[in-house]
Image (tube, rainbow, N blue to C red):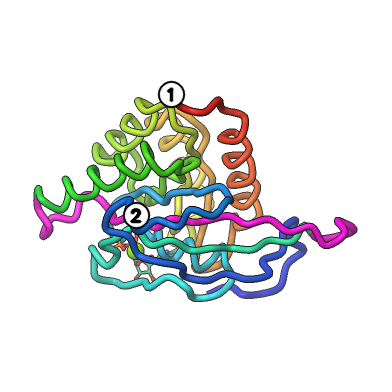
Amino acid sequence: MGREPQALPLKVLAAEFVTSATSVAGVPSDPGPRIALVGRSNVGKSSLINALAGRAIARTSATPGRTRLANFYRVTLAASAGAGGRRSIVYLVDLPGYGYARGGHGAQFAFAQLAEELFAEKGLAAALLVVDARHPGLDADRRARDWLAGRGLAFGVVATKVDKLSRAERARAIREIAATLEGPALAFSAATGEGRDELWSMIAELGRARAERPARE
Ligand code: GTP
Ligand code: MG
């Protein structure tokens, strides 16, 4: 995995697993925006968290359906040059993937129900919709997009595994994903670290979008 130090706009001071929740009862209540990772099983959500954190805090696996609970990770960030040691905290929430065939209908429902509760009751700030750059336009991703949009949630689309595509294929894939999911898609690779800075910027923006939104009734 790409771990070369880069000139990051944000520096990760600490990153750790906090808790796994099967229901809203177990969710941490301290402040800090919560960004949920939404995407098909095996798409690379946990790998993306590790790439963002710059360390392996989330369990990844070639076997789909690895993440079955909502796993909360706390990332402490420092703004780099001249920010006078200012810190901020962001929670990344790894949700179970959807579209995992062996889990069948029940597993799909478990995802929707948990996600529904978390977004409604626990102030999940926003989501990253993670899709596979090699498979633009999947129905399941389109439904997830509609689910997020239908709830008025701020979300950004991340097309991961771009390392598996040529330059030309990648450009086409990003265009197709943007068209089918009706918004810009960010090219990302957990394997090479490509897109990491841009993704942190997207997360910062999503956190702000939430802060500016009026509280729910
Ligand atoms: P579930 O927890 O089952 O929903 O899966 P997940 O979305 O968390 O996927 P995970 O991060 O476990 O990654 C699944 C597989 O894809 C693993 O074998 C990863 O090594 C691989 N993978 C993830 N991201 C990338 C990437 O950017 N590039 C490449 N080449 N492989 C990746
Ligand atoms: Mg996972």
Determine whether, in the image, residue 203 is placed left or right of residue 156.
right
Amino acid of disc 1: Glu
The quarter of the displayed image where residue 196 is located: bottom right
Quadrant of the picture in which ligand 1 is shown: bottom left
The residues colored magenta run: 80-104
Task: Estimate the spatial distance between the alpha carbons at disc 2 and disc 1, rounded to whole Å.
Answer: 25 Å
**Which dot marks residue 217?**
1
Front-most of residues 175 and 41: 41
The percent position of residue 55, horizontal first and vertical second, equals 55, 75
Front-most of residues 61 and 124: 124
What SS does tag 2 mark?
A: loop
Front-most of residues 64 and 58: 58
Q: Image point 23% across, 43% down: which residue?
A: 113
Q: Which residue is mark 2?
A: 95
Q: Image point 39% across, 56% down: which residue?
A: 27
Is the residue marked by circle 1 packed among few (<14), some (14-19), or many (20+) residues within 10 Å? few
Determine whether, in the image, residue 180 is placed left or right of residue 106.
right
Q: Is mark 1 within 8 Å of ligand 1?
A: no
The percent position of residue 203, horizontal first and vertical second, equals 58, 47
Q: Image point 34% across, 49% down: which residue?
A: 39
Amino acid of disc 2: Leu
Quadrant (top left, top right, bottom left, bottom right) of the C terminus: top left
State whether residue 152 is above or below residue 87.
Answer: above
Front-most of residues 209 and 41: 209
- State which mark lies toward you, 2 or 1: 1
Can residue 93 be found in the magenta stretch?
Answer: yes
